[in-house]
Image (tube, rainbow, N blue to C red):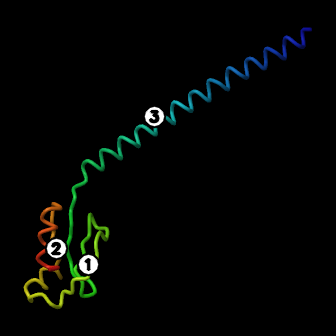
Amino acid sequence: MKKLILITGVILIAYVVLTAVITSNAAKTKDVLETQAQTTVTQSAEEPTVYMVKSEDNRVVVYLNGVLYLKTDAPVSNLPKADKNRLKEGIVIDSKEKLKSILEDYCS
């Protein structure tokens, strides 16, 4: 009978310890995930939208924050020399409205 009580006590203590460890790890994991989510939202909110209109392979292309966003079929060779030079250097644009206007100028 004493052995049964002893085994039951050991099992109960092991259960309590494991439950405490699991609960602690779950809380830490939740905190880490919340911190990562807040960091992602903050970075997204702070990151400015920057469009870069350039010429590549004799076509007008647009990059959004350094990533290819749009590749048009508009040939650069049909544009005046001044426009070709601007596109060669790249035109920085900070809004979608300005981007639409520039694309209408170069692609129509």
Task: Tell me the CA gap for discs 2 and 1.
Answer: 9 Å
Q: Where is residue 25, by image quadrant?
A: top right
Q: Is residue 16 left or right of residue 58?
A: right
Residue identifier under label 1: 72
- Rendered-image quadrant of the C terminus: bottom left
Q: Where is residue 105, by image quadrant?
A: bottom left
- The amino acid type, in three-letter code, at marker 1 is Thr
Residue identifier under label 2: 103
Q: Is residue 30 left or right of residue 19?
A: left
Q: Where is residue 37, by image quadrant?
A: top left
The answer to whether the residue labelled 2 contacts the one labelled 1, judged by CB atoms less than 8 Å apart, is yes
Residue identifier under label 3: 31
| Residue 22, percent from left and from top | 62, 29
**Comes first in the chain, label 1 or label 3:** 3
> Residue drawn at (9%, 89%), measured in percent from left and top?
81
Q: Residue furthest bottom?
A: 77
